[in-house]
Image (cartoon, coloured by chain):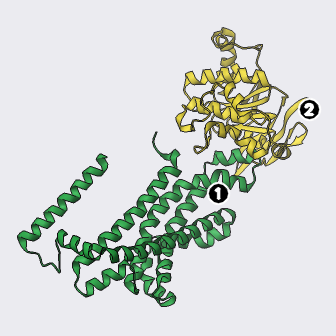
Amino acid sequence: MRTILVPATTLLMLLFCWQVAGRVFHFNRVILPSPVEIASAFAKDYARLFRETGITMEESVLGFILGAGGAYLLAVSFVYSRIIQEAVYPYAVALKSTPLIAIAPLLVLWFGNGILSKIVMSALVAFFPVLVNSANGLTSVDPDALDLMKSLSASSWQVLTKIRIPNSLSYLLAGLKIASSMAVVGAVIGEFTGATEGIGHLINTSSYYLETPLMFAGVAMISLGGILFFGLMAYLEKKIVFWKQSQ
Amino acid sequence: MSADSAMVDVVNVSKSYSSSNGAVPALDGISFSAEKGEFVSIIGPSGCGKSTLIKIIGDLVQPSQGTVRVAGHTSRDARQQGMFSFVFQNPVLLPWRRVIDNVRLPLEILGRHSRDPAHLLEMVGLTGFETRYPKELSGGMQQRAALARALTFDPQVLLMDEPFGAVDELTRDSLNSQLLEIWQKIRVTVLLITHSVSEAVFLSDRVIVLSRRPGTIREILEVPFTRTREKSLKETPSFQEVVKFLRERLE
């Protein structure tokens, strides 16, 4: 309870100071609207805000599933084929920290300005952290556990399902937490680059019309979406990788 | 070559590892055998290759030279038939499995139903902990669970690689007594690697002393005490004398 109350108080105090400072110093509402103005923009346009946020979250989640799923399967294939690993892995490590969003215009060019280009963008940025983490988790297995399995003449399928995959789960979930945040960023960048809907499009157009309170409301909405997505992954981590938690 | 009753027959086994400076010998010309149901300990200074030796016997590592026969089979055939069971220095329990499911693991892999996992947990004194997870158990209890797991599938040869090296003295003593008790019930052939001379003497029928690297056999000693052995044996002068003799052979 305390872990929620204390940061929530910080937020309320910040909003309060922001509101008071706006009154006292007469901020230009186009540059920095007050929290109350943002709230009223939200009240006026909430249906649209929810709809556009929903679209962006849909793109993010689909891209995330595609990217993370593909990455995990590729990581499993590394266990079976050294050649695939040697051919692909160095690039995966390099691309993990490359700003892939730089290719967003290219994706819009290839996949159009509908949701497909955003899904691909999300999938790409979700892919690499999951691949690198999963590959680590599938291979960094206690050598004694492998000896134990070998002494029992376990098949490679048994080693995979009874040792490697369970061992990889904590690494996988850590990767999914990173990927969930990245996927939302990817979708929004895709929308900035070229889109007809989605929260990125809303933020872009309201910037064009100098509707700054709506911009802020849009930013708040997609932040909330990202936090919920991340929170879901953190929750799953706690449930699935229960043996890593302290007693 | 050796008596028909030999369970494990190690013949002239050598092992060297290749390094940038050429081959580094680890074991040199090891030969010995263990009877069915015998308890044999192998002691030696650290780095003498005793862990390598037990892994060669269990077909986890290939020897550079020599052969290992197990009840007339090659060690590979013996491993594939599930004749070996390993206990390592670490318990190697899978943290995502409950204790009983850890004990059951070999049965799942081998597709056997040799012994009841719950009964084995009772034998090692872990009744009531079946549905706990490994991290809820102390180090000594984890190692007892590992011992139960090693016995579920009714192996012919129990290969123990410093199984009690990571626990404190008191726990070690009680684990030793417990191991003896269980061994007396099921009479599996045991090869035990240890660096504790008194543990080796207390538990074994025979003690094999290896030399410094590359490991060669320095001494094979028949332990002159009868079964059943009580803890108090360790305090007797004759026990101390045997320990002292072996310590000198270790130098």
- Percent of width and height locating residue B35: 85, 28
Name the quadrant containing residue B51: top right
Can residue B43 be seen here? The reply is no
Judging depth in this view, the residue of A182 and B25 nearest the camera is A182
Can residue B174 be seen here? The reply is yes
* Picture layout, residue B130 above or below residue A150: above
Amino acid, disc 2 = Ser
Residue at 58% over, 43% down? B95
Amino acid, disc 1 = Ser
Judging depth in this view, the residue of B12 and A68 nearest the camera is A68
In primary-sequence order, the first of circles 2 and 1 is: 2
In the rendered structure, the residue with mark 1 lies on which chain? B
Secondary structure under the numbered disc 1 in the rendered image: loop
Residue at 78% over, 40% down? B57
Question: Mark 2 sits on what residue?
Answer: B2
- Which chain's colour is green? A
Question: Mark 1 sits on what residue?
Answer: B20
Residue at 56% over, 32% down? B139
Judging depth in this view, the residue of B248 and B72 nearest the camera is B72
Q: Are marks 2 and 1 in contact (CB under 8 Å)?
A: no
In the rendered structure, the residue with mark 2 lies on which chain? B
Residue at 69% over, 63% down? A80
- Which chain's colour is yellow? B
Q: Few, some or many C-alpha atoms within 10 Å of disc 2 (few <14, some 14-19, many ≥20)?
A: few
Judging depth in this view, the residue of A106 and B205 nearest the camera is A106
Judge left or right: residue B89 versus residue B203.
left
Which is closer to the viewer, label 2 or label 1? 2
* Picture layout, residue B208 above or below residue A97: above
